[in-house]
């Protein structure tokens, strides 16, 4: 089975721009979660989508949003980028119920200049 | 509020010896605990998990122990190998698939 894939792997943007990141979960996984990793804050939960609905949300401003499509693929969007948004953005997928394991993709490294 | 804490930023052990990584938590609502291994600029790789109703889970060289009364878990790696050198994160799971991570511990296994 193919693992979680994320595109693009690297991205450079300037302040004020917006960005869209994509995540394709493992086949059969219907839950997709997004995390942000920064040196100062560590790994932090952004949000989780299941069956095209946001099921959980972390403590991030409204500039961070996401969605999930009927094929379980997910996108996250960050609008009005700030320097502090520079981070590794990770996507994880899991089976819908009971399974405790989340499998992570390789991440998208975003640099905001 | 740091719900999951890994108090040791780094740990160095000799090849073949035991590595013990520790994690403390405060949230009683965690139903599973997971350990991940991570290399720079890569996604975390799942190692082992434990349900909150268990006290031990073993998988090959990896064993996780959970002490609910102390709100403490530990990951034992025996024997340690140089390829185990990485950052190790513990995480607690709540509501659905939300994971709360600790700060990570850099493990270095010296040949």
Image (cartoon, coloured by chain):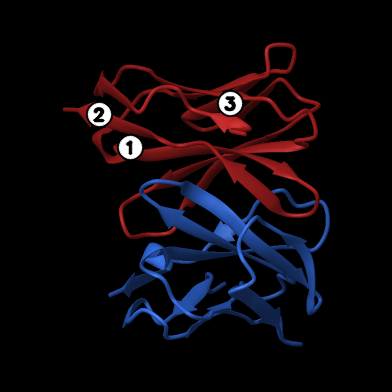
Q: Which mark is residue B63?
A: none
Quarter of the picture holding the N terminus of chain A: bottom right
Disc 3 residue crowd, few under 14, some 14–19, many 20+, Cα 10 Å: many
Toward which corner of the image does residue B81 lie, by quadrant?
A: top left
Give the vertical position of B103 relative to A86 (above or below): above
Whichever of callouts 2 and 1 sits on the residue coming sooner in the sequence is 1
Residue that carries the numbered disc 1 in the rendered image = B84
Same chain for the residues under marks 1 and 3 in the image: yes
- Is B7 on the left or on the right of B94, as rendered? left
Q: Residue at x 29, y 21 (%)?
A: B16
Subunit ID for the residue under disc 2: B
Are the residues flagged by discs 2 and 1 in contact, CB closer than 8 Å? yes
Question: In the structure shown, which secondary structural element does the residue marked by tag 2 occupy?
Answer: strand
Q: Are marks 3 and 2 on the same chain?
A: yes
Q: Which quarter of the figure has residue B104?
A: top left
**Image quadrant assignment for residue A110:** bottom left
Residue A35 rendering spot, x and y as whole percentages: 55, 60
Mark closer to the chain start, 1 or 3: 3
In the rendered structure, the residue with mark 3 lies on which chain?
A: B
The number of numbered badges drawn on the structure is 3
> Chain A shown in which color?
blue
According to the picture, the residue beneath numbered tag 2 turns out to be B109
> Mark 3 and mark 1 in contact (Cβ < 8 Å)?
no
Identify residue for label 3: B64
Q: Determine the CA span between mark 2 and mark 1.
A: 7 Å
Of callouts 3 and 2, the N-terminal one: 3
Chain painted red:
B
Q: CA distance from mark 3 to mark 2?
A: 19 Å
- In terms of secondary structure, where does tag 1 sit? helix
- Work out whether disc 2 and disc 1 sit on a shared chain: yes
Q: Nearer the viewer, residue A94 or B92?
A: B92
């Amino acid at each position: 089975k193919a693992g979680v894939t994320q595109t693009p792997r690297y991205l450079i943007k300037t302040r004020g721009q917006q960005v869209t990141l994509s995540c394709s979960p493992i086949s059969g996984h219907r839950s997709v979660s997004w995390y942000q990793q920064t040196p100062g804050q560590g790994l932090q939960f952004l949000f989780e989508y299941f069956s095209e609905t946001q099921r959980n949300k972390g403590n991030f401003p409204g500039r961070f949003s996401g969605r999930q499509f009927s094929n379980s693929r997910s996108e996250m969007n960050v609008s009005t980028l700030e320097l502090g948004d520079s981070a590794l953005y990770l996507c994880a997928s899991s089976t819908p119920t009971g399974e405790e394991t989340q499998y992570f993709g390789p991440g998208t490294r975003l640099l905001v200049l | 509020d740091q719900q999951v804490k890994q108090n040791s930023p780094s740990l160095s052990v000799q090849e073949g010896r035991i590595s013990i990584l520790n994690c403390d938590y405060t949230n009683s609502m965690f139903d599973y605990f997971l350990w991940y291994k991570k290399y720079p600029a890569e996604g975390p790789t799942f190692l082992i998990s434990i349900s909150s109703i268990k006290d031990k889970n073993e998988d090959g060289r990896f064993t996780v122990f959970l002490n609910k009364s102390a709100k403490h878990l530990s990951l034992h790696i025996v024997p340690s190998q140089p390829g185990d050198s990485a950052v190790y994160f513990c995480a607690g799971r709540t509501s659905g698939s939300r994971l709360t991570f600790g700060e990570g511990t850099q493990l270095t296994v010296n040949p």
